[in-house]
Amino acid sequence: MKAIIFDLDGVVVNTAKYHYLAWKKLAKELGFEFDVAHNERLKGVSRMESLNIVLEVGGITGYSEEKKNELADRKNGYYLSMIEKLDQSEILPGIPEFLEKIRKAGYKTALGSASKSGGMILEKLGLMPMFDVVVDGNLVERPKPDPEVFTKAADLLGIPYEKCIVVEDAKAGVEAAHAGRMKCIGIGNPEILGAAEKVVGSTEGLMQVDLENL
Ligand code: B16
Ligand code: MG
């Protein structure tokens, strides 16, 4: 028994850019610029933790919990309206083929996403049948780099952690995989994701990864 657990944003679908644009819009309303370099810190991080980072970038301190909840809800509203028309064209290249290949090869598949919209997005993309288990932000309490999102997926699949491979685009996600005693394939920049067992530049590279010898 073996499994591959997929992060969502930046791995299965191109929603990472909408998270970024929504935070950028909020930052602008708060009076500061939020750029791509700052955004790297938000990848894979929960909504509230992301807000704390955004406020830190803007040098804003002292907001009440109530105000922070309002800002997080506002950002989520922007995000949800941006992804309203999300369709299969935004599935990242090679992902459907890779899912098909690994399932045929006997791997179980799971989603392991910090996003509370994770399940809804898979439905929208018609990818639900390709996943045996879906764990999203509604089912976990501790954000990455805590391994909870991945260990929960493995537990639901009934597969030992050592037999799981995580696919991630975020540093916090690579750390979470390792904290859960799982191997990790990074998607993106090796300077950022270098701790992963293997890093490929984009999802298209997944087909070439030797999964049995990571
Ligand atoms: P939401 P992932 C993460 O998804 C995103 O990378 C991160 O930028 C976002 O803040 C987080 O989900 C929470 O998303 O606000 O929709 O609950 O990469 O773990 O699939
Ligand atoms: Mg991600």
Image (cartoon, rainbow, N blue to C red):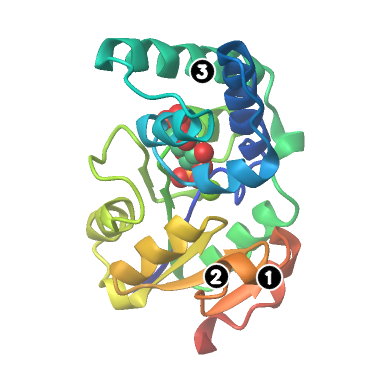
Q: Is residue 134 above or below residue 78?
A: below
Q: How far apart are the alpha carbons under marks 3 and 1?
A: 31 Å
Quarter-wise, where is residue 136 in the image? Answer: top left
Local secondary structure at mark 2: strand
- According to the picture, the residue beneath numbered tag 2 turns out to be 185
For this rendering, which residue is in front, 204 or 191? Answer: 191
Tag 2: amino acid: Ile
Residue 200: give its label. 1
Q: Is residue 115 above or below residue 99?
A: above
Q: Residues within 10 Å of mark 2 (few under 14, many from 20)?
A: many
For this rendering, which residue is in front, 210 or 32? Answer: 32
The quadrant of the picture occupied by the N terminus is bottom left
Identify the residue at horizontal 36%, vertical 30% (top origin): 48
**If you read the primary sequence from the N terminus, does the residue marked by circle 2 or circle 3 appear first?**
3
Q: Position of residue 151 (x, y in %)?
A: 27, 59
**If you read the primary sequence from the N terminus, does the residue marked by circle 3 or circle 1 appear first?**
3
**If you read the primary sequence from the N terminus, does the residue marked by circle 2 or circle 1 appear first?**
2
Q: Position of residue 52 (x, y in %)?
A: 39, 32
Residue 75: give its label. 3
Q: Residues within 10 Å of mark 3 (few under 14, many from 20)?
A: many
Identify the residue at horizontal 64%, vertical 70% (top origin): 191
